[in-house]
């Protein structure tokens, strides 16, 4: 049900602000009023910490092993709210390590490139420093393309130019030659015409082979340091977890810093919304922080839109996520979740309709919930699917299907009680299943219309309740009773009783559909036009044939996979292939069935059910809390 919410102003002394906000975050009892116009707090430091820590966490994730799927991260409350400078120091230390790693890798790229470039001259008997000291000649080092080697060699010999070639490299043939400084420019131009390119060797007092040895030593030392750092990162899971705590800590602190406290002469106060059933809890929370406080509780202003808070049992509350994906209910309407949850649960189970698939949902999701403990809207969705596993099992028992195979559970139970009970085979009773699907649609729509009546009465509008709710309930149920009386039971009493209710429904529409129109003609025309809505209801009812379609398709695909697996058996290899077909086929069918049931069940709720009464347009009651990204639970 929808719980009323009240406006609350909490007055305290300014020195208690931080403690109050911590208590409110922990208790999740007060939803702050619109914070879109937040105070201009300086949170650049907090944003910087979050961004830096997130970057490091992402970098570390590339090195350390991923935690197990069921890993659950908990932090003690006292540890979470404590501002621990050790985590900031840890962040800075790991940042420096990554910076050092990047510098070492960049240095190694430079060293590798240099070694590669000078290696062709490793046999050069001179140092590059010595080559630059000659007064009358110039030493040139470079490369000539392989296909120009012979021509350049001939040119050197013809012109008596001192030279020496070394073994072929990726750049071509390395060469060193000597030119007189007086004719250097002219000769060099001719030599370049033979595809010669100058090499740029570093100036060094070492011979090239010794230089390469030195560079290799530097390279190896850097590689050793890189391995040490990467080994540290590989074992950095605990470091990553500490930084994740830092991120969530800082985000929670930032949220507190952005809360807009207003001032009076002697106190400060914060405004928000509190559930009517948690006003005493708010008093308790504030009192635990300070005895010097006051809380002003008031009704919302006439033009003010309050958040929507609901209070449902554990089962129904999980299905609120289905409704909220469509639209959060507003505070002036009825909560659809108690009724919608039952229908969603039942229809989902029929659409899946298999004991095996239901067991996969119950066992798999049950273990996931137990060990992973998902939170937020995702947790609710997981619970919806988990609960729907039970109705899938029940439907599977009725259909006699476990992974598409007929196991005759109903027959077995019947034998125990000496009864000739039979499973309901959809493939043998398609027309009957279609009728059942339409019957579910009648009841589903009628329950939506019942909520329409309840909503109209809540707004003191009995004529709308009669014209738009009771009338169509009477037509739908009356028409169903007539069909049953005419076909299944063959009872004239039921047939005419149903027709009477249909007539009453149409009469209500004719008399009341045009109640807002002026003049007799307008009222009658609107009344007759209201009957045209019958076509809409026929269309709505036909939509429920998707229950048959999905249940049948899942059953047929499962049966087909079993048949294919059976066809390839007959040898050891065939058995292996049949197992693969069986597992892959059923996993595929299970995944597609799960997705299809979720989508189409939701569609029936959103279009057919909600379309009869639901307005939505509200926004969810979300109190101030520790909104953690990485921590699963903050424990006491």
Image: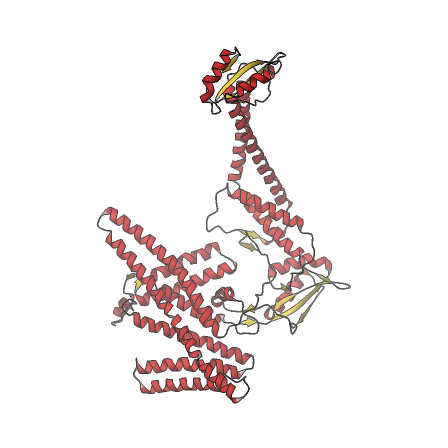
Asked whether, in this view, residue 417 is left or right of residue 385, the answer is left
Q: Can you name the residue that lies furthest to the left here? A: 570
**Taking 594 as reference, is 280 above or below it?**
below
Tell me residue 295's x, y (percent). 68, 67
Give the quadrant of residue 565: bottom left
Give the quadrant of residue 91: top right
Q: Nearer the viewer, residue 254 or 102?
A: 102
Q: Nearer the viewer, residue 287 or 556?
A: 556
**Taking 20 as reference, is 471 above or below it?**
below
Q: Can you name the residue that lies furthest to the top here? A: 160
- Kindly tell me whether residue 216 is visible in this rendering: no
Q: Quadrant of the C terminus?
A: bottom right
**Taking 269 as reference, is 175 above or below it?**
above
Tell me residue 388's x, y (percent). 41, 64
- Kindly tell me whether residue 41 is visible in this rendering: yes
Q: Which residue is rendered at x = 62% and y = 11% of the image?
A: 136
Tell me residue 7's x, y (percent). 65, 69
Q: Nearer the viewer, residue 361 or 331?
A: 331
């Amino acid at each position: 049900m929808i719980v009323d919410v009240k406006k609350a102003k909490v007055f305290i002394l300014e020195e208690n602000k931080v403690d109050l906000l911590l208590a409110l975050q922990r208790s999740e009892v007060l939803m702050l009023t619109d914070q879109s116009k937040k105070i201009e707090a300086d949170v650049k430091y907090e944003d910087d910490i979050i961004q830096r820590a997130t970057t490091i966490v992402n970098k570390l994730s590339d090195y350390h092993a991923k935690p197990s799927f069921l890993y659950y991260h908990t932090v003690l409350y006292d540890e979470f709210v404590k501002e621990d400078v050790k985590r900031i120091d840890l962040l800075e230390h790991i940042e420096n390590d990554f910076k050092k790693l990047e510098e070492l890798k960049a240095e190694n790229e430079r060293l590798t490139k240099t070694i590669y470039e000078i290696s062709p001259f490793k046999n050069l008997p001179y140092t590059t420093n010595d080559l630059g000291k000659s007064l009358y000649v110039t030493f040139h080092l470079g490369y000539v393309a392989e296909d120009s080697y012979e021509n350049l060699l001939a040119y050197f010999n013809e012109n008596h130019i001192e030279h020496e070639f070394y073994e072929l490299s990726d750049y071509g043939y390395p060469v060193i030659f000597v030119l007189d400084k007086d004719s250097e420019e002219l000769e060099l131009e001719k030599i370049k015409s033979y595809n010669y390119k100058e090499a740029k060797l570093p100036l060094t007092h070492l011979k090239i082979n010794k230089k390469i040895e030195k560079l290799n030593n530097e390279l190896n030392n850097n590689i050793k340091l890189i391995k040490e750092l990467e080994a540290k990162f590989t074992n950095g899971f605990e470091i990553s977890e500490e930084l994740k705590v830092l991120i969530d800590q800082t985000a929670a602190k930032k949220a507190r810093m952005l809360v807009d406290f207003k001032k009076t002469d002697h106190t400060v106060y914060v405004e928000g919304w509190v559930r009517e059933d948690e006003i005493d809890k708010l008093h308790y929370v504030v009192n635990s922080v300070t005895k010097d406080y006051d809380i002003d509780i008031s009704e919302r202003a006439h033009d003010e839109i309050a958040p929507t808070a609901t209070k449902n049992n554990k089962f129904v509350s999980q299905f609120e996520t289905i409704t909220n994906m469509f639209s959060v209910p507003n505070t002036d309407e009825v909560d659809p979740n108690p009724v919608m949850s039952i229908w969603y649960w039942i229809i989902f189970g029929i659409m899946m309709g298999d004991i095996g698939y239901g067991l996969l949902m119950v066992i798999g999701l049950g273990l996931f919930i137990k060990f992973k403990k998902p939170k937020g809207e995702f947790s609710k969705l997981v619970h919806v699917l988990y609960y729907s596993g039970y109705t899938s099992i029940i439907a599977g028992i009725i259909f006699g299907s476990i992974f598409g195979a007929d196991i005759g559970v109903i027959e077995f139970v019947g034998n125990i009680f000496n009864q000739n009970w039979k499973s309901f085979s959809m493939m043998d009773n398609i027309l009957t299943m279609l009728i059942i699907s339409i019957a579910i649609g009648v009841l589903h729509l009628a329950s939506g219309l019942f909520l329409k009546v309840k909503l109209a009465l809540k707004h003191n509008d009995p004529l709308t309740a009669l014209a738009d709710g009771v009338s169509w309930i009477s037509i739908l149920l009356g028409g169903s009773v007539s069909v049953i009386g005419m076909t299944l039971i063959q009872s004239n009493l039921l047939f005419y009783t149903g027709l009477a209710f249909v007539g009453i429904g149409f009469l209500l529409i004719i008399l009341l559909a045009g109640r807002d129109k002026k003049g007799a003609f307008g009222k009658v025309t609107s009344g007759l036009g209201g009957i045209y809505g019958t076509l809409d209801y026929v269309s709505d009812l036909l939509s429920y044939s998707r229950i048959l379609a999905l249940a049948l398709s899942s059953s047929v695909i499962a049966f087909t996979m079993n048949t294919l697996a059976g066809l390839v058996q007959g040898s050891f290899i065939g058995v292996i292939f049949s197992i693969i077909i069986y597992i892959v086929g059923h996993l595929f069918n299970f995944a597609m069935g799960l997705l299809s049931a979720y989508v189409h069940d939701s569609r029936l709720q959103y279009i057919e059910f909600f379309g009869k009464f639901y307005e939505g347009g509200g926004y969810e009651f979300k109190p101030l809390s520790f909104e953690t990204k990485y921590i699963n639970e903050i424990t006491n």
